[in-house]
Amino acid sequence: MTTIDTRDIGGHGGHADGHHEGSYLQPKGGLIATVWDWMTTIDHKKIGVMYLFATLFMFFLGGMAALAVRLELWAPVRQITDAAGAVKVTGQAFAWYDSFGQNNDLYNRFFTLHGAIMVFMFIIPSIPAALGNFLLPLMVGAKDVAFPRLNLLSWYVYVTGSIFAVAAIIAGGVDTGWTFYTPYSTTSDAGHWRVVFMVLGVFILGFSSILTGLNFVVTVHKLRAPGMGWFDMPLFVWAIYSSAVIQVLATPVLAITLVLLMFERIFNVGVFDPRMGGDPVLFQHFFWFYSHPAVYIMILPGMAIINETIAVHARKKIFGYRAVAFSSLSIAAISFLVWGHHMFTSQGEIASAIFSALTFLVAIPTAVKMFNWTTTLYKGSIRFTTPMLYSLAFLFLFAIGGLTGLPLGTLATDLHLHDSYFVVAHFHYVMMGGTVIAYLAGLHHWWPKIFGKMYSTFWANVGCIIVFIGFNVTFFTQFILGTRGMPRRYASYIDDLQFLHQISTVGSWLLLLGFLVHLFVFVHSLIAGPKAGANPWGGLSLEWETDSPPIEHNFHHEPIVKHGPYDYDDVVPPHCDPKDYPLPAPLPEGHKGH
Amino acid sequence: MTTIDTRHGGGEVLDDRPYHEKYKHAAHFRTAEAEFDACKLGMWLFLATEILTFSGMFVAYGIFRMMYPQAWANGSHYLDPFWGGLNTVILLYSSFTIAMAIHNAQKNQQFWLKVNLIQTIVCAIAFIVIKLAFEYIPKWSAGKRPGSLFTYPFAENPYEPIWWGVYYGATGIHALHVLTGVVLIGWLLIRAQKKHFGPTHYTAVEIVGLFWHIVDIVWIFLFPLLYLID
């Protein structure tokens, strides 16, 4: 009996060679065939691009809500009784929209939507699911992630969760804050299903995050190219791996918490309801057991990007490779021990003191990273490309964000600063000044690889400078507002604070302008940008060894690792002109980089 | 007999060996072993998420047990250890049968593979039937319900509604996992009928087996906590 059968049994692969050498972006037939091809693709690159657009759309929605919040804060909301005894409300930016009556319901809904969308639908999936999906298999020299179909499923799960959340917004929005604290979240908006929809949406999104994380961990363990040991991986992979471990281990706790919250809201189970003997602080413990590690799910991928952009655009070997790699893992480990610092005012003193001490531990691996990045820059051939400008912005902003975390981790100062604008400014410096700025660095760094097109560096740099100024104008003022006693989540404030609030609001418009410049640059690049070479920046990690955009099966030949990802000392002439982008000289045969 | 398969490009010769013998691993894995290891590692990570999910219920159990020990003592007296114990025995036996099913697949014992899968499904359904008929339905209709649905007139402690909240929450989520297991093992049975599993390829049996063991282990912890200690 003859036994040749090349049918596609495993659901993936088994294609004849030479059939898929074209770019992954090449359309498959007509419009409908192409759309169908994208919607059913199991190619990690296409799924990454679909995540890119889905998360950027959510960034737009969350950004609009943020602009609305800042607009409402232009003037304090006041209820004034005039001489005739008539009650008048002043300072409402959205007074014309009165379906919620004359109160701050609309404002509460805007800041909740901003928080929930940005955290659950933008920042958490943004870098890992978009850039990580695209780059991680390329960087380890694999053809795909370990479970390609699971990867596509996680995108659909993400979209389903987002639809539930958007349905909650269309039905009138949610006013619980993104933290859904009980008992407010179980009693507010009674008679409506909006809160349940929002919580269900976040619950579903959690599974998308778990599946992505699980896929990445297995990919890094099992699919590295021959010759690539753990310490030959780019540091991007180390940080994404650490973040994926947190995604897998922390998110299930959020899932069970949100299930209990929905039970509580629908069936009045009573677990979190003090009237029935339940414990609302238990909800806070559960919630932050996920949501504190989640802030490292958000920042570690940002750090992942900075590892690459700094080394490539300063053309220098990263300083202290192993220290940076292990600092990612130790951040992941410590992230599970510090959730209690969100409850300094609602838990016992001894617990607070212990959590405060543990919180300071996070500063150590984070500082290791900061020092290693700045040392990498030292005597590097720094080129002021857009990714490098954004990386420098990251170092500056993340340093401020990190250092302002210390007074919040200290019990005595936190009692003064908690729930104030100081906290708001701190986490925006870390989440936006850190992750979003790093995301933009990464987007500009890998844009030529993803879409095969260059963009206008000049206009992208202009956009970067506007974003940087706008960001500081918006959020640095909020540190001052916080120390002067402005509490978060209020639409009203004393007159003395109005000037600072207005500066902050003007800053938010500058941010909008900066992002519009970037939007223009990207659209222009897609339509009319010059074609990018395979390796426009002279990077040494494996993703630069394939075409731009990569071919469908990633590499023409199975990649064999010949040099480390940062061996610039060996390949770059010491005094090259920083204006051009020298490609690494070919290595002599049999030479191993380090 | 040689037939020409024209389904995928044509020209290849059709092969009628059983699926598990001609199974070719997915193209992005370098070897079949790498694929098997990756699937197992993925499943172990998923099991870690399962344990963390249930840990929420166990922490809630512990916290409220500490806060309201009397309500918790009363609560466990309402449960009948006989039915809980019987269900424990049933689940333990089903863990044995699924382990044997993996062994049968490795040894290419197609008949016993199916017998053991069917036994596992029967055990799982028996577990659910006992849970519903002798526990959920009688207790619910007696008013022993969670939270504000609680109407049981002879409660001795005001915090018993919370006990029922934790009881229905923990065992309900576990029961959902048992039902998921029925679906997954049913899928295995259909594939086993088509001779999909054998010594060279039994990944699905192995990882569903792992899932079934975690369902069992969670129950092993729920049973003494809910039924035995007061």
Image (cartoon, coloured by chain):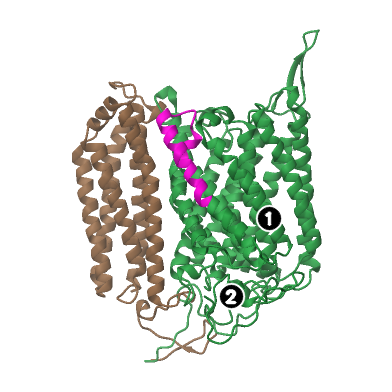
Chain colours: A green, B brown
Which residue is under mark 2? A554
Quadrant into which the N terminus of chain A falls? bottom left
Quadrant of residue A525 within the rendered picture = bottom right
Could you say which is closer to the camera, residue B114 or residue A207? A207
Alpha-carbon span between mark 2 and mark 1 = 31 Å
Which is nearer the N-term, disc 2 or disc 1? 1
Residue A553 percent coordinates (x, y): 57, 76
Amino acid found under the numbered disc labelled 2: Asn
Between A325 and A438, the one lying in front of the other is A325
As helix, strand or loop, the secondary structure at mark 1 comes to helix
Dot 1 surroundings within 10 Å: few (below 14), some, or many (20 or more)?
many
Q: In this view, does B178 lie above or below A343?
A: below
Q: Residue A425 in magenta?
A: no
Instruction: Judge whether residue A337 can be spotted in this image.
Output: yes
Residue drawn at (67%, 58%) of the image: A441
Residue A221 coordinates in the image, percent (x, y): 44, 66
For the residue labelled by badge 2, is the local secondary structure a helix, a strand or a loop?
loop
Q: In which quarter of the image is residue A36?
A: bottom right
Q: Which residue is drawn at 35% across and 55% down?
A: B181
Tell me if A498 is positioned left or right of B47 in this view.
Answer: right
Task: Answer left or right for A356 relative to A416.
Answer: left
> Any mark on residue A392, and which?
1
Q: Which mark is residue A329?
A: none
- Picture residue at 73% right of the left edge, 63% below the top: A385
What range of the chain is rendered magenta? A339-366
